[in-house]
């Protein structure tokens, strides 16, 4: 290769510069594409995890709503069982009171204690007022 004048030298240096710029541009584009691919994988992974969390939250919500309905029914059943026990205890007291003579207390009801819901609960749980 003969370099005869400055114009030939200029074209040689320009060609080398274009080749270097092309090489570094391609290298930069490769890393940009690699980063975008990695970002795409991360976004896809996050999206899958968010869908999984959303599914878990929906099932949890369904379980909580079903559980709360069951809890309401359970509390009503327990309340009815307690009321049944109170009624049975009152029936037993009424049967045993019929067999006994009324006491000579000063009250108009013949010494018997008035029955209220609080007294029923206290009697059922054997709590003294």
Image (tube, helix red, strand yellow):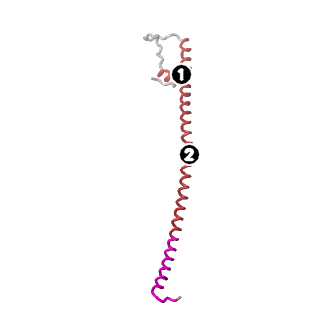
Viewer-closest of 33 and 45: 33
Q: Where is residue 105 in the image (x, y as percent from the top left)?
A: 45, 11
Quadrant of the rendered image containing residue 57: top right
Mark 1 element type: helix
Which element carries disc 2, helix, strand or loop? helix
Rendered location of residue 35, percent (x, y): 52, 63
At horizontal 55% and vertical 42% (from top left) the residue drawn is 60
Q: Which mark is residue 86?
A: 1
In the rendered structure, the answer to whether residue 84 lies left or right of residue 6 reads right
Q: How crowded is mark 2: few (under 14 residues within 10 Å), some or many (20 or more)?
A: few
Q: Name the residue at 52% across, 10% down.
A: 101
Residue drawn 53% across the image and 88% down it: 1
Give whichever of 61, 116 is nearer the camera. Answer: 61
Is residue 87 part of the magenta span, yes or no?
no
Q: Is residue 99 above or below residue 56?
A: above
Residue 56's disc is: 2
**Residue 106 coordinates in the image, percent (x, y):** 42, 11
């Amino acid at each position: 290769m003969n370099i005869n004048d400055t114009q030939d030298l200029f074209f040689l240096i320009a060609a080398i510069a274009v080749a270097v710029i092309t090489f570094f541009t391609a290298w930069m584009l490769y890393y940009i594409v690699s980063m975008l691919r990695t970002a795409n994988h991360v976004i896809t992974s996050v999206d899958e995890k968010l869908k999984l969390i959303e599914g878990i939250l929906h099932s949890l919500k369904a379980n909580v709503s079903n559980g709360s309905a069951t809890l309401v029914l359970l509390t009503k059943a327990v309340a009815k069982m307690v009321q049944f026990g109170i009624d049975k205890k009152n029936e037993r007291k009424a049967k045993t009171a019929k067999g006994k003579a009324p006491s000579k207390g000063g009250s108009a009801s013949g010494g018997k204690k008035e029955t209220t819901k609080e007294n029923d609960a206290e009697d059922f749980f054997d709590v003294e007022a």
